[in-house]
Image (tube, rainbow, N blue to C red):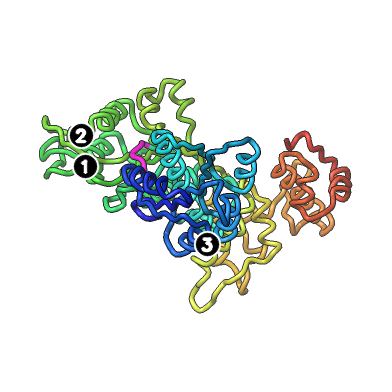
Amino acid sequence: MVDKPRILTIDDDLSLLRFLKQALSEFGVEALGTQSGREGIALYGEENVDLVLVDYMMPEMNGIEVLQQLKEKDPNAVVLLMTGNASIESAVEAMKLGAVDYLTKPLDVDHLEIVIQKTLRHQRQAEKLRLLEDQVIRQGSFEGLVGVSAEMHRVYKLIDRVAESEATVLIQGETGTGKELVAKALHRRSGRVGGRFVPINCGALAESILESELFGHEKGAFTGAIRTKKGLIEQADGGTLFLDEIEDMSPGLQVKLLRAIQEREVLPVGSDQTIRVDFRLVAASNKNLRSLMDGGTFRSDLFYRLSVANLQLPPLKSRREDIPLLANHFLALYGKTGKQQISEIASEAMMLLQAYAWPGNVRELENVVQQAVLLTDGPAIVPGDLPPQLVAVEADGASVAWYDMPLKDAQDKLERLYLEEMLKRAGGRVAEAAKLAGVNRRSFYSKMSRYDITRLEHR
């Protein structure tokens, strides 16, 4: 879409075309118009049109026919129908064919403006989501985050929706799920991309050091303060400050941070002069901050200030379909070792990667692939190159390596894990699980019976 939206009006009434051109220009819209349906369809193909207003009753070609041809030309065409003879039947027909709304004549200017602005706003959001989905489908990634699962699509959409606002964002998720990558994506897609992205891990520093790092200090403020230092909040002026493991911040520092967020100013250690700072805060935690707040170890006023927008990242075990994509992504990063190029993960090894629970999430998977690349002797990573915890399964309460089991036992164990995973993804619906597995429902039921699996426990 161009900066100034462009609307094409198709109506055989010349006086209405003139009226709409004037009204639309007052709405901040560029207006095009024609009295012919065929000319309107041709104009749509030649011009960068964001929205089409078309009359229902016209000679030669009516509005429904225009709508049909526009949708054939561009399935994403946004069309509003106008008519002086409104009926339930015509409205239903128009909506079934893809019209986004239906306006009756004589047109009310205020209502027209509301409908057009709402439609353009929805179109902009839909276009952004289409571009996002195209990127994910094409590359399997989004702003450095890798994954095509439904869980990751939800994360991408939330990032896209929240990024352009100035809202403080709280990212929550287990260790290794990619919280800093999400924070960087928010920064890159925001209006602050020209400013700095300033990260700090609150759990890695003692309270006194963290205070100095965040707020800065004056020369002589404490022993060792040999010069004035600008704090990280001030360094993030015009950009984004990312505070990881914010749950480790002391109550005293939580108060100072809350003031900095509310007043947009900081007071360096040893100074009596505040400094104005324009920054956006993105915070992250691998703990449940609401539980910490209820337990009195995290301030409720800071929690509510942080969680204006809340992003929850899924653990890797809940998006196992992304594991092959992630594993091959890391293989591409680390597969070149000296003169040897490790270019493949054997199917048996990939099955083990997908069966593992990944308590350390994506970070653990990256580490495992990197280690396997160093250990393998051939062009492909095989089960023997993987660490012991990946090649072990629980069998009758004991940990047993896959390759220490008879082949039949290993196959049975893996098949059971596979069936349970399909049922989990399908929410316990056997027909859907069978479809995901590429087998018929009767066969899937037979295998469930063989392994004593019930669908109720996977709902």
Residue 97 seen in the figure = yes
Question: Which quarter of the figure is the C terminus placed in?
Answer: top right
Q: Which residue is mark 1?
A: 234
Element under disc 2: strand
Q: Dots 2 and 1: beta carbons under 8 Å?
A: yes
Question: Which residue is pictured at 63% across the width and 50% down the height?
Answer: 320
Amino acid type assigned to the residue bearing label 2 in the image: Val
Which of the two discs, 3 and 1, labels the residue nearer the N terminus? 3
x, y percent for residue 69: 58, 58
Question: Which residue is pictured at 36% across the width and 23% down the height?
Answer: 301
x, y percent for residue 356: 65, 50
Amino acid type assigned to the residue bearing label 1 in the image: Glu
Q: Which residue is mark 3?
A: 139
Name above or below for residue 437 compared with residue 27. Answer: below
Element under disc 1: helix
The mark tally for this picture is 3
State which quadrant residue 231 falls in.
Answer: top left
Q: Nearer the viewer, mark 3 or mark 1?
A: 3
**Magenta residues (range):** 164-168
Which of the two discs, 2 and 1, labels the residue nearer the N terminus? 1
Q: Which residue is mark 2?
A: 266
Which of the two discs, 3 and 2, labels the residue nearer the N terminus? 3
Residue 338 lies in the magenta-colored region? no
x, y percent for residue 83: 53, 41
Q: Nearer the viewer, residue 210 or 196?
A: 196
Question: Which residue is pictured at 75% across the width and 48% down the height?
Answer: 417
- How far is mark 2 from mark 1, CA to CA? 8 Å
Amino acid type assigned to the residue bearing label 3 in the image: Gln
Name above or below for residue 191 compared with residue 264. Answer: below
Q: Nearer the viewer, residue 455 or 450?
A: 455
